[in-house]
Amino acid sequence: MSSINVKKLSFSYRPKEILLKNISFDVMPGAFLSIVGPNGAGKTTLLNLLCGLLRPQAGSITIDAALIESYSTKKLAQKVAVVRQEFVPVFDFTVTEVISMARAPYLGTFGFESKDDMKIVSEALELTETIQYARRPLAQLSGGERQRVFIARALAANSPILLLDEPTNFLDLKHQVGIYDLLKVAQLEKGKTIVTVTHDINLAAQYCDETLLLGAGGDYQYGCPKDVFSFEQIERVFGVSTFAGDVGEEKFFIPLGKFAKDRGQIKSKLDKD
Amino acid sequence: MTEILTAKKLAIKVILCLMVLVIVMGLCTSVGTQNISLKKVFTGPGDVPGANIDYEIFVVRLRRVILAALVGAALASSGVVLQAILRNPLADPYILGISSGAGLGAIIAILSGISWTFWGGSAVTAFAFAGALATVWLVWFIGHFSGKSQVTNLLLAGVVVNAFFSAVIMFLTSIAKSEQLRWTVYWLMGSIGDKEPLVLWISGVCILAGIICLFVVCYSLNVLTLGDEQARGLGINPTKTRLAAFGFAAFITAIAVSLSGLIGFIGLIVPHGVRLVFGPDHRQLLPVSAIIGAAFLVAADTLARTIFGQEQLPVGVITAIAGGPFFLILLAKYSRKVGWLK
Amino acid sequence: MLIAFICLATFVVISHYHNRDRASELNLTESVNKPTRIVCLAPNLTEILFALGLGERIVAISSDSDYPSEAANKNKVGTFWSPNTEAIIASRPDLVITLWFEQQKTVAESLKRLGYQVLTLNIEKVEELFTAIEKIGIATGCKHDADKLVKNISKQLSDLQQELSSATKVKVLWVIQIEPLRVAGRDTFINELIELCGGENAIGHTIAKYPQIGAEELLACGVEAIIQSAMGAGNITAQQQAAEMFWNRWPSLPAVKDNRIYVVQPDTILRLGPRLPQGIQLIARYLHPEIFAQTPLVAQ
């Protein structure tokens, strides 16, 4: 189980515009963190900082009590697996081949996979229900199917930390929930530390232990979804009013646009509560 | 269910391909414009030069076949690697400046009238080699000014350097006298000639060593095709991998070009053909392409030197004419396998 | 589309032959006014003019005309490969003499269009040299001198043939390029030169004029003497040494065994002009040293 500690992190792409200002938070070993916020707040940037792709201008990131800069590329890859959205379909590698590339940090000089490596790959294929595409070229799959393949690859990397950038973007409802179920199982049974960037507040509230709510201009809120997600916070950060409700422990938020039916009624109901 | 390339499977494939290559080389060595009897060849060289002409012709043919195999292997391997590094299936070994650099070196050697030889190699060979490597270094240097997209910058640097050096070549040929002009044009067209055994040995060792070094990088090349960020996340250093791959590929291409001029088509087509049949895994693609490239050039050169009797066709003409339709057939036959061509 | 292709092909073929004929038939009326401002665009043409005693009437020449030494003082109008039309016009010539190949032909055409008197000659054989000299004689009003020059040259040539009549032909390979290996074929002036010098081209008929040959053909052709064109400005002695080292790769060649490898400066020897006999003499000496040992070498 691995922990991530972020201390006074600051980052900007251009000198005058500071994106992330003095952010500090600790991700406990085996925790499930979601990063939410409006577009441009810096969620993906934060993720890139957490996986070592970008270097902060100030502050530090430590993984398992060692600074992220102290890890070699290979060692870092063994600790952190990243699932992204982009896909460059240049050559027609099959799904199996793509997933087995996750074993790269563990292979010898010539890069031949062992039977154990292939077992891990098979497991990942089964877990993500992508085994039926095992022999197909990746480029032939739909966006959603590809997403699951990338998640399978992250699982095959067998790393204690999983970083995911909007993993449910192209997935249908069944698979959205399915993926989060999968991640939750990975967290609970295998003790993985998981950080997802997501637009879906409701799923985040349902599954995650901790939430980082990033607002534009660098302000942020860190805590459990119960505390962080409130009608006021969401309206302030996202600039959208929502219909907030809860069923027992589960909270949910439904965004309200100008043309929501019976908006007046909902608003008055809210005012009453 | 989850089958993947293993060392054993690869070794078997490579050995089979090598056997095919040996057969092709053997057949081509026994073909030529002069009729020689193999029985006479086996009686050995004789005590005096000229005693057994059949033997000497055989040796000269063998040298040529070996050179063609080496150049073909080098160009095909280089093509595989450059297509991977640049993430571009249309890349060939010459795309990053090697062709114009070698051409410029050769032309400078020719125009300056330097005529010394060394180890049996000529000034033209040496200058072409130096020119190729210098250009490659220049392209790499220019391509790394801006940190952002290495691949795009490399490609652009290659295009710019090629264009500039081609302009210089044009200028130099315009001020050259007619004799010198003929020299440069025919050198650039590419041909497989007779080289001294020492030259063959040295270049053979260098090219084979280069291909083996490239093989070590092959797995990283697989991962690199996913994109720089993804590769880094999987523990592969994109810059180091690209540098190593490019360096070795440029080295073996420079050797090939300095020995035989600019023979086109092999570095572009052979990797494609092999990829269509065997898939994009570079651990397999590289050795098989090297072998197929060798066989292809040996066959093409044999055609080039026998089709018109005493005189020879530039081998680049054969590779272009043969390679084109051959590739189209492959494409049609295997396009079902490849989704993204639909 | 097939019809278009056939039309295009026919057009190309016809224009090729049409132009060929035009080069040989010229308006060869004896000029009433002898031209006094002559521009000539090739080294051999310059030599012919000087040999006919017309040196003073030349106003401009191409920059590579290096013989005789008086030619150095003349104005230059571009090179053999790219004559400078403007400079030619600026010299106000009343006769321009050019060769027949593409670059000079276009210049000739444009000058003709401007109304200049242009004489275009095709000199690729000894026969054509004589015809050219005669035509120059007519165009410049020196027919008498031209005929004398022709007789002179052909006498030297026939004397040479006399001396060589009993000699056995030597198998010669004239190498014009090393990388790749290219030699002069049968359909070239070099071949004619070789035969005039008592030699025989070691390779047979080929499609290309200067074919590329392989080491295999080299070993099989039994070449007895190799003549190599020197390259550019390089030191001839250095080139000779380099050539010998190069050809030693094939020690079974008769030419290598007897060390009959000669590097020669092609510009002067292959120049089809009044000094042709000297060039032939030089090559004949190489090929048949036994016949010419006693004859003093004529100054180049």
Image (cartoon, coloured by chain):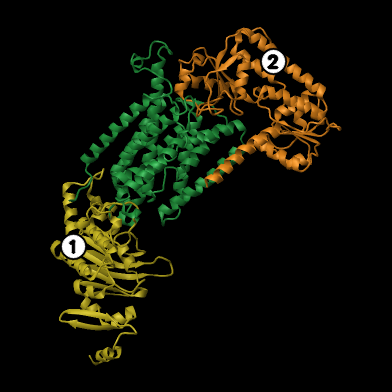
Say above or below: B322 vs A168: above
Three-letter residue code for mark 2: Leu
Q: Marks 2 and 1, Cα distance to the nearest angstrom? A: 99 Å
* Residue appearing at x 20%, y 79% in the figure: A251
Q: Quadrant of residue B26?
A: top left
* Disc 2 residue crowd, few under 14, some 14–19, many 20+, Cα 10 Å: some
Q: Colour of chain B?
A: green
Q: Colour of chain C?
A: orange
Quadrant holding the C terminus of chain C = top right
Q: Which mark is residue C157?
A: 2
Residue hosting label 1: A192
Q: Position of residue A104 (x, y in %)?
A: 25, 50
Q: Is residue C282 left or right of residue B98?
A: right
Q: Is residue B43 left or right of residue C231?
A: left
Q: Is residue B132 visible?
A: yes
Three-letter residue code for mark 1: Lys
Q: Position of residue C262 (x, y in %)?
A: 57, 18
Q: Colour of chain A?
A: yellow
